[in-house]
Amino acid sequence: MKDYGNGALAMWNGWSRSRAGIPANDPWLEHFEDDLEARRGEVFLDLGCGTGADTLWLLEHGYDVLSADYAREALRSIERNLPGGRTAYVDMRRPLPFADGSFGAVVSSMALHYFDEATTVRLMDEVRRIIAPGGILLARVSNVNDVTYGAGSGREVETRYYDHGSYAQRYLDEGDVRRFFGAVGELEFFEGAMTRPEAYYSRPKMMWTIRAERTQA
């Protein structure tokens, strides 16, 4: 299968350079404030952090956060623009370079839907591994109805996984959410539209918002 990760690297570095600076406010984590507050004092991981919209929110609320991404330009932007930000280079196609149970929460917005099925399954096992028992994954991924941003367009490489050129993206239905994210633990999710205060996201993007709590076993 085509390795979209290598092909997409230049694109993501360019994306990060074009958005360098203080990231746009994206307050979706407010819905989970009680969850996050209950785990205050533990380290949180912003996985696939981009230029740090979620990192900024977490830092402003006083949490200890490590920001991880594949695009080094994204990490540089965080290091330059977000005082207190700590970064780590991560390629999610590979085993995650963190010890078992390292994080009280893993936050990942629009970063876990770019992989083929086998890689996604392995990645969810890795996410579960690095979350402490009782910790949580909070994530957003593309919905099968996200036709404005590519669902159903391009070449379908796997079911609901579309080749868009230098990258591919998965658009999940409810069964996909249960199958992939249920591996992390006890699962809750809902669908809705997301907008951000930047030109690219001026139209609503259909998303799944996911909470998975790692069980003790």
Image (cartoon, grey):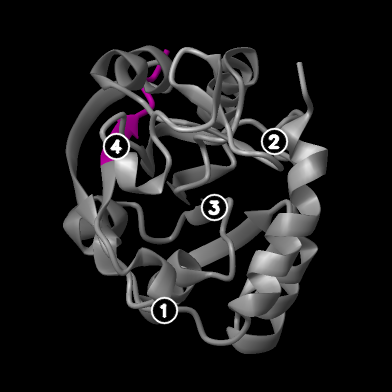
Checking the image for residue 99, the label placed there is: 2
Q: Residue 123: percent from the left, percent from the top?
A: 60, 25
Q: Who's the residue at 63% across and 81% down the image?
A: 20
Q: CA distance from mark 3 to mark 1?
A: 19 Å
Q: Amino acid at mark 2?
A: Ala
Residue segment shown in magenta? 208-217
Q: Main secondary structure of the magenta part?
A: strand
Q: Nearer the viewer, residue 201 or 156?
A: 156
How would you rate the neighbour count of disc 4 (Cα within 10 Å): few for under 14, some for 14-19, many for 20 or more? many
Give whichever of discs 3 and 1 has the lower sequence position: 1
Judge depth for marks 4 and 1 and give the one in front.
1
Q: CA distance from mark 4 to mark 1?
A: 21 Å
Q: Amino acid at mark 4?
A: Ile
Checking the image for residue 45, the label placed there is: 3
Question: Is disc 2 placed on a helix, strand or loop?
Answer: loop
Question: Is disc 3 placed on a helix, strand or loop?
Answer: strand
Checking the image for residue 210, the label placed there is: 4
In the picture, which quadrant includes the C terminus?
top left
Judge depth for marks 2 and 1 and give the one in front.
1
Q: CA distance from mark 3 to mark 4?
A: 16 Å
Proximity of marks 2 and 3: CB atoms separated by less than 8 Å: no
Give whichever of discs 3 and 4 has the lower sequence position: 3
Q: Residue 168: percent from the left, percent from the top?
A: 60, 34
